[in-house]
Amino acid sequence: MERWQDLKYHEIYEGTLEGLHRRRSIDPGFTLEDARRQLEQLYVLDGNDWLGRGELGDIVSMATIAAYEAFIALWSAEEAPVAEFEKGEH
């Protein structure tokens, strides 16, 4: 990526990740499953590029998806020890 592309990617990625963490901290109704459903919708939108969204749109889509994937992975990892404990696997 060129410098402007790299900067835009990181701007979108960090902003999306920060927004997801903020939402999780202030919205008790926001669940891991909600985040997963939103990611699935992002995959659909990414695949619906038949008109072409351009280079900037592609960067925004890639960074947003990557942020959701990272957020979900972190949240899932936090819940894994709890799930193991509840199943008696400690």
Image (tube, grey):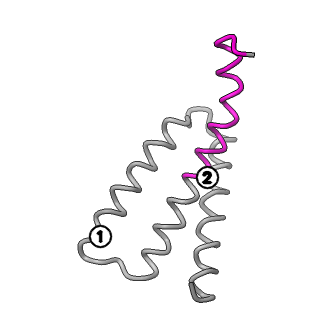
Name the residue rendered at 31%, 62% in the picture: 47
Dominant secondary structure (helix, strand or loop) of the stretch shown in magenta: helix
- Left/right of residue 2 with respect to residue 40 in the rendered view: right
Compare marks 2 and 1 and give the one earlier in the sequence: 1
Q: Residues within 10 Å of mark 1 (few under 14, many from 20)?
A: few
* Stretch in magenta: 69-89
The span from disc 2 to disc 1 (Cα, nearest Å) is 23 Å
Name the residue rendered at 49%, 39% in the picture: 34
Q: Residues within 10 Å of mark 2 (few under 14, many from 20)?
A: some
Point out residue 2 in the picture as x, y percentages from the top left corner. Answer: 58, 89
To which quarter of the image does residue 24 belong?
Answer: top right
Q: Tell me the element at label 2.
A: helix
17 and 5: which is toward the camera: 5
Point out residue 14 in the picture as x, y percentages from the top left corner. Answer: 66, 64
Q: On the rendered image, what quadrant is the C terminus found in? A: top right
Name the residue rendered at 59%, 69% in the picture: 12
Point out residue 69 in the picture as x, y percentages from the top left corner. Answer: 55, 52
**Amino acid at dot 2:** Ala
Residue 64 colored in magenta in the image: no
- Left/right of residue 4 with respect to residue 90 in the rendered view: left
Q: Residue furthest top?
A: 88
In this rendering, the answer to whether 12 lies above or below 52 is above
**Amino acid at dot 1:** Asp
Any mark on residue 49, and which?
1
81 and 38: which is toward the camera: 81
Q: Please name the residue that numbered disc 2 is placed on.
A: 70
In this rendering, the answer to whether 52 lies above or below 70 is below
Q: On the rendered image, what quadrant is the N terminus found in? A: bottom right
31 and 50: which is toward the camera: 50
Q: Tell me the element at label 1.
A: loop
